Structure formats: C-alpha cells, structure tokens
Image (cartoon, rainbow, N blue to C red):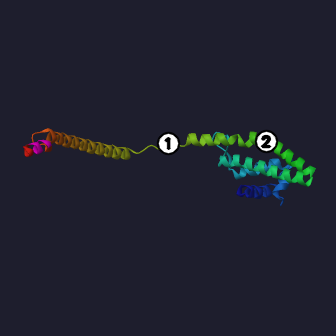
C-alpha cells in the first residue's frame, strides 16, 4: 500500500493531474507510471554509465503490485460491464508484461548482483586471530591436562583394586 501511495504521489507530480490510481492504469500513462516507479526506486547511472537502481528489490515488487492492481481493475470493469476500461487495463498489462520487464525489472537483478560483488568481505583482525589462537591453545592444554589426570587416577584405581590391599583381598583375609 505504501508503494502504491508513493507511486500515486509521483504520478501526480509527473503528469500534473490529481486523478485516482485507476485512471493511470491505461496504455496512455504507461511511460509516466514507469518513470514514477523508477523515481521511487532511485534510478541512476553508475560510474560506467550503466542504468541501475538504489533499491532494486522495490523495482521487482512494484511490477508485481502493478500487475495485481491491474487485475483488480479489470475484474471491476468486467463486473460493471465497462468494456473501454477493461481494454485500457488490458493494454496497460500488455505493456507491463512486455516493456516493464525489459526496460526496468531486468536491471534489478543485475544491480543486486553488482552490489553483492562490490561489497567487500570483512575479515577478522590480526588481534582477534591472536586472541582466538591463545584461547584455543589454553583450552586444548587444559583438556590434555584433565585427560592425563583422569588416566592417572584410573590407573591408580586399577592398581588398588587388583593389588594385595584390594577390598576383595582384605575381605578374604578377614574371613580366614
């Protein structure tokens, strides 16, 4: 709804008419609708002179929203028996499917991809890596020390159990 409101505000400025959105959904105003949509999406030329958008995802969303609004207007026109309005929306939809995707929405994925490729990958700092190394070394040495102590205790318990002073031997000697 917000995108449609922004589109309508930009359309009214571009065309200089205070009309409802449904009036602009005809082939006559297609170029104005496309221009208003490009303004909302931050259309500009990059350093290499290529067309791109500030918010490319909005371009794709705008195309889908316009398609849905056209279907609603066409449904209302069919219910009311308004052939001229239905024909206008049909012409707008035809232009939307053919020209909007070629002129506008095909640039959006390219802009998204270039933004992703131009975004640097942030690597951890040297200090962080040194801290991580010290932490892991401390944990490993602590674990090794614990394992060695556990092994020594188990060895000593085994010796006590099987030696001359084991509980079983002491009980046998006591019973004699």
- Percent position (x, y) of residue 119? 54, 43
Dot 1 or dot 2, earlier in sequence: 2
In this picture, residue 124 sits left or right of residue 73: left
Q: Secondary structure at mark 1?
A: loop
Pointer 2 residue: 97
Highlighted magenta segment, given as a residue range: 168-172
State the CA–CA distance, disc 1 to disc 2. Answer: 37 Å
The answer to which quarter of the image holds residue 94 is: top right
Residue placed most toward the observer, 62 or 35: 62
- Percent position (x, y) of residue 137? 30, 43
Q: Quadrant of the C terminus?
A: top left
Q: Residues within 10 Å of mark 1 (few under 14, many from 20)?
A: few
Q: Residues within 10 Å of mark 2 (few under 14, many from 20)?
A: few
Q: Quadrant of the N terminus?
A: bottom right
Residue placed most toward the observer, 17 or 5: 5
In this picture, residue 16 sits left or right of residue 146: right
| Secondary structure predominantly adopted by residues drawn in magenta | helix
Q: Secondary structure at mark 2?
A: helix
Residue 1, above or below 167: below
Pointer 1 residue: 121
- Percent position (x, y) of residue 2? 71, 58
Is residue 84 magenta-colored? no
Is residue 169 magenta-colored? yes
Q: Looking at the image, which residue is at 71% across and 52% down?
A: 40
In this picture, residue 147 sits left or right of residue 1: left
- Percent position (x, y) of residue 135? 32, 46
Q: Looking at the image, which residue is at 57% across and 42% down?
A: 116
Q: Looking at the image, which residue is at 89% across and 49% down?
A: 86
The tally of labels here is 2
The answer to which quarter of the image holds residue 13 is: bottom right
Tag 1 and tag 2, C-beta contact below 8 Å: no
């Amino acid at each position: 709804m917000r995108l449609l409101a922004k589109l309508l505000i930009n359309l009214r400025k571009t065309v200089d008419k205070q009309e409802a959105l449904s009036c602009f959904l005809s082939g006559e105003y297609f170029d104005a609708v496309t221009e208003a949509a490009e303004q909302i999406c931050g259309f500009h030329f990059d350093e290499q002179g290529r067309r791109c958008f500030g918010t490319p995802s909005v371009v794709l969303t705008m195309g889908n929203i316009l398609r849905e609004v056209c279907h609603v207007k066409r449904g209302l026109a069919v219910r009311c028996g308004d052939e001229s309005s239905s024909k206008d929306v049909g012409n707008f939809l035809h232009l939307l499917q053919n020209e909007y995707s070629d002129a506008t929405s095909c640039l959006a994925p390219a802009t998204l991809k270039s933004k992703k490729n131009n975004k640097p990958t942030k690597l951890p700092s040297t200090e962080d890596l040194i801290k991580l190394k010290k932490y892991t070394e401390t944990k490993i040495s602590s674990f090794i020390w614990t394992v060695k102590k556990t092994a020594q205790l188990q060895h000593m318990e085994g010796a006590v159990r099987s030696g001359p002073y084991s509980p079983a031997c002491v009980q046998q000697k006591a019973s004699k």
